[in-house]
């Protein structure tokens, strides 16, 4: 279970760094849990090869081949802010799972990550159809996570959270601002 949590924090660190948002710790109740390792248990050189938008090879920056969203500046900033809020919510879910507060973890997943009417409307306004579909799939996976969390089964909950993060990582690997 510790390895799964370290993996999740590693994925969170990768996503967070893609948006230049800094350290996820301190933004949510996770502060009381301590600071997770920034590499999520990966070997020290791993992240420099996997960073979205800035992979390195032999000390040289490689071309970012992700699909640009080309959103107008105001919409791009709004969208980035939502990505950071999603990341904070994922961090909050991890915190509540670790604290065995599955009810609060479920509530956070549903209200802050789930496919609410507001989230559906925002996804529907995205001009790229694939990005829009991936966003809706992400929010649906968060709804599924919220339901699994209600069972208070930590193993199933971590698997459902992993499914959410797979959606995050897949989207960040495909698209950029």
Image (tube, rainbow, N blue to C red):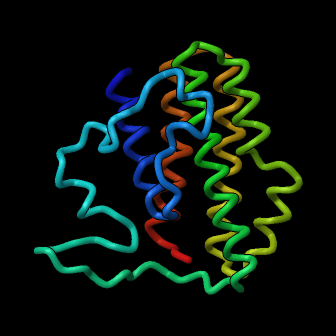
Instruction: State the image quarter where residue 38 is shown.
Output: top left
Q: In this rendering, would 61 be left or right of 154?
A: left
Please give the name of the residue rendered at 54% of the width and 83% of the height, measured from the top-left corner.
68
Please give the name of the residue rendered at 44% of the width and 78% of the height, measured from the top-left corner.
66
Q: How many marks?
A: 0
Q: Tell me residue 104's x, y (percent).
A: 72, 22
Q: Tell me residue 69's x, y (percent).
A: 60, 81
Image height of 23 relative to 4, above or below? below
Quadrant of the snapshot with the N terminus: top left
Image height of 95 relative to 124, above or below? above
Of all residues, the one furthest to the right in this rendering is: 117
Q: In this rendering, would 174 be left or right of 27?
A: left
Q: Nearer the viewer, residue 29 or 75?
A: 29
Quadrant of the snapshot with the C terminus: bottom right
Q: Tell me residue 15's x, y (percent).
A: 47, 55
Q: In this rendering, would 146 be left or right of 42?
A: right
Image height of 127 relative to 122, above or below? below
Of all residues, the one furthest to the left in this rendering is: 58
Please give the name of the residue rendered at 28% of the width and 71% of the height, measured from the top-left corner.
55
Please give the name of the residue rendered at 75% of the width and 79% of the height, measured from the top-left corner.
74
């Amino acid at each position: 279970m510790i390895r799964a949590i370290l993996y999740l924090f590693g994925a969170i660190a990768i996503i967070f760094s893609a948006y230049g948002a800094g350290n996820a710790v301190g933004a949510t109740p996770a502060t009381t849990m301590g600071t997770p390792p920034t590499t999520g248990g990966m070997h020290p050189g791993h992240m420099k090869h996997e960073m979205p938008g800035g992979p390195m090879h032999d000390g040289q920056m490689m071309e970012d081949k992700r699909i640009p969203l080309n959103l107008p500046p105001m919409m791009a900033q709004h969208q980035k802010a939502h990505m950071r809020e999603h990341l904070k919510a994922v961090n909050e879910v991890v915190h509540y799972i670790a604290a065995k507060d599955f009810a609060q973890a479920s509530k956070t997943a549903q209200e802050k990550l789930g496919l609410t009417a507001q989230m559906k409307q925002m996804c529907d306004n995205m001009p790229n159809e694939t990005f829009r579909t991936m966003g809706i799939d992400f929010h649906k996976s968060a709804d599924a996570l919220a339901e699994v969390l209600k069972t208070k089964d930590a193993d199933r909950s971590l698997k459902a959270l992993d499914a959410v993060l797979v959606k995050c990582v897949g989207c960040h690997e495909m698209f950029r601002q």
